[in-house]
Amino acid sequence: MTSRTLVINPNSNDSVTRGIDQAMDSCRLDYAVDISCITVADGPIGIETDEDISAVVPLVVGEIGKHDDCDAFVIACYSDPGLALHRQAAQLELGVPVIDPVQAAVKMAAELLGR
């Protein structure tokens, strides 16, 4: 059974989501994982302020709740809007991880360096 990962772009910019989706092509080839990328349609066009962050937190929680068939979630935003809340909700309710790109990259770099 292939595991499913949902990458959530919390802003409403579809071109950003398409770019993320294209960037995932190598992961799709290298790993046995089904990666889907979605846009939070009601989010702001960009995440630039604390108000933007606050506005998208419940929207991302809602998207996670709609996709309870996924094995992991990635919040594709460097400001990590509501990451702790999303992790708590997804792990408690669904038993799956929520990952952010910056932490994932730093952890991978540390692993590659053997630290």
Image (cartoon, grey):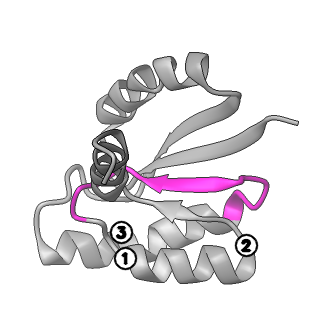
On the image, the x and y values in percent for residue 28 come to 58, 23
| Mark 2 vs mark 1, CA separation in Å | 18 Å
On the image, the x and y values in percent for residue 23 come to 38, 24
Q: Earlier in the sequence, mark 2 or mark 1?
A: 1
Above or below residue 92? Residue 110 is: above
Residue 100 quadrant: bottom left
| Mark 3 vs mark 2, CA separation in Å | 22 Å
On the image, the x and y values in percent for residue 111 come to 37, 47
Horizontally, is 66 left or right of 23 in the view? right
Above or below residue 88? Residue 35 is: above
Looking at the image, which residue is at 62% across and 27% down?
A: 31
In the rendered image, which residue does mark 1 sit on? 82
In the rendered image, which residue does mark 3 sit on? 56
How would you rate the neighbour count of disc 2 (Cα within 10 Å): few for under 14, some for 14-19, many for 20 or more?
some
Q: Nearer the viewer, residue 47 or 45?
A: 47
Q: Which residues are magenta?
A: 66-79
What's the residue type where badge 2 is placed? Gly
In the rendered image, which residue does mark 2 sit on? 95
Q: Earlier in the sequence, mark 3 or mark 2?
A: 3
Looking at the image, which residue is at 20% across and 59% down?
A: 47
Q: Is residue 77 magenta?
A: yes
Horizontally, is 73 left or right of 17 in the view? right
The secondary structure making up most of the magenta span is loop
Q: Work out which quarter of the rendered image holds the N terminus and state it.
A: top right
> Disc 1 on helix, strand or loop?
loop
What's the residue type where badge 1 is placed? Gly
Label 2 or label 1, whichever lies nearer to me, is 2
Q: Work out which quarter of the rendered image holds the C terminus and state it.
A: bottom left
Horizontally, is 93 left or right of 15 in the view? right
| Mark 1 vs mark 3, CA separation in Å | 8 Å
Labels 1 & 3 near each other (Cβ < 8 A): yes
Q: Earlier in the sequence, mark 1 or mark 3?
A: 3
